[in-house]
Image: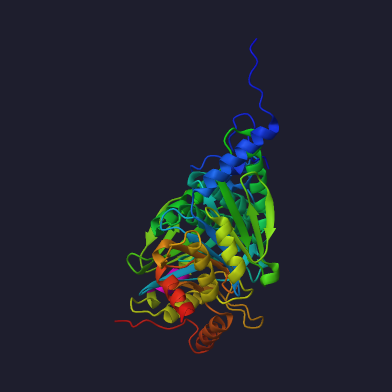
Amino acid sequence: MASHDPHSGRLAGLFASPDTSSFSEFLGGYSPELLPGGRSLPRAVTAGDEIPHGTTIVAVTFAGGVVMAGDRRATSGNVIAQRDIEKVFRADEFSAIAIAGTAGLGIEMVRLFQVELEHYEKREGRTLSVEGKANRLATMVRGNLGLAMQGLAVVPLFAGYDEARDVGRIFSYDPAGGRYEEREFHAIGSGSVFARGSLKKLYRPELSAEDAALVCVQALYDAADDDSATGGPDLTRGIFPVVAAVTSEGYRRFGEDDVGALARSVVEARHESPGGPSAPLR
Amino acid sequence: MSMPFYVSPEQQMKDKADYARKGIARGRSVVVLQYADGILFVADNPSRALHKISEIYDRIAFAAVGKYNEFENLRLGGVRYADVNGYQYDRRDVTARGLANVYAQSLGTIFTETNKPYEVELVVAEVGEDADTDQIYRLTFDGSVADEHGYVAMGGQAEAVAQSLKDAYREGAALPDALRTAVRALEAQDADRRLVAASLEVAVLDRHREHRLFRRLPAARIEELLAQSAS
């Protein structure tokens, strides 16, 4: 790496221009091929569904925070590409990110987003606001628009703890980089239609973090029930959804044992009532 | 044709080195020392905004004395170096040794090729699994690197501070005692110097934390630790 430009006497490369605190912006100038949007693509070819796709993600707010959960399946067409993929990640101390769509690109976007937040924090000595983080992510999703139009869309779901208001907030995205704040709960991915119906019936404002986690597991069960691309709790292999909460205490992933117990209780109850808990009619 | 004044390379380098040393000697000191749980950084720095001690990566921190704009530029470059490498390879592949090399190259080139050398001195430290695998590199304005063990003093009255550390430093000390040793050493800058929590910048690389091991200690915590070690 050249660290110095002998002609002007100025530092080049990594040490030049202290102007931007955005990691992705810097990387775009320094080494553009490392950015998802910086690659050249074959023209007018659409990727088939043989590339693994991630499926259902749900998020539910509760007093003082938000819980996010994702199933563990990735599919390539009708084949299960991976049964224990992780799609929910810690973005930084006070936020979580999850992805649906093309798994490889999604995980790359998550990695870039994580570095983006940490990079800003280290350079500026402060963390971005929740909106700031959500907007930054919107830019990254938009950068992927060309790929999305060729069939490689990535759609994230972002959940953060808002310190100023002491609430959890959820942001959803469309492949063109549209950013929408969601109230109370949201679901994305192929099973999201079924998950959202389930969330609608099970959500209530007075949920605790543990109850919100249970709501998420129930919703994922309903998604897996009707969507072949979403994986249900795998009791034989002990593979359960990834569940994480973000509160004033920071990001916390629920332990494997806790989620296992929740998932088992949900499966157990479905033996009695396959449709899950029923909402009162009046 | 008129002849320009001839200045021998030896003289040129000596002048630059004197210039840089004078600049550094005007500032206040910083000490870095190993303690039981990791590496402790203490700066005589009342500013809450202009830091002399900073996080670079998961296990790596940076401390500097001298001209703020110059070492800040190096710090920002270091953060970029670390994040670019961690993103391209893996977080484990970012090392203090690699970073110290990049700094040494930059400082060395600036020293030989520009008229004005950087008036800075740096420490790049990486906390290991145990005290034996901790790494502390000290870099000077001309790009020389030294591998240090135990403690480092830099800045204004570095010799007096280092002498105090040499007398009082104990391997494997607990945090309150290590902090007390560091503060006493910084007080050795002047005969009548007294440092309170508000005039100190303190941070640790604590090997028992998770993920990002760097942590700044707030004034209240510094006060508490100093009170513990006094009793």
Left or right: A115 as drawn, with respect to B94:
left
Magenta highlight: main SS: helix
Residue nearer the viewer, B167 or A14? B167
Q: Which residue is most to the left?
A: A282
Which residue appears at 53% of the width and 65% of the height? B185
**x and y, in percent, of residue A112 in the image:** 56, 54
| Scheme by which the image is coloured | rainbow
In reply to whether residue A196 is colored magenta, the answer given is yes
Give the magenta range.
A195-200
Compared with A260, A173 (above or below) is above
**x and y, in percent, of residue A44 in the image:** 62, 40
Residue nearer the viewer, A59 or B21? B21
Residue nearer the viewer, A67 or A22? A22
Q: Quadrant of residue B10?
A: top right
**x and y, in percent, of residue A188 in the image:** 48, 63
Left or right: B230 as drawn, with respect to B160:
left
Residue A26 appears in the figure: no
Residue nearer the viewer, B69 or B191? B191
Which residue appears at 54% of the width and 61% of the height? A99
Instruction: Name the quadrant of the N terminus of chain B.
Output: top right
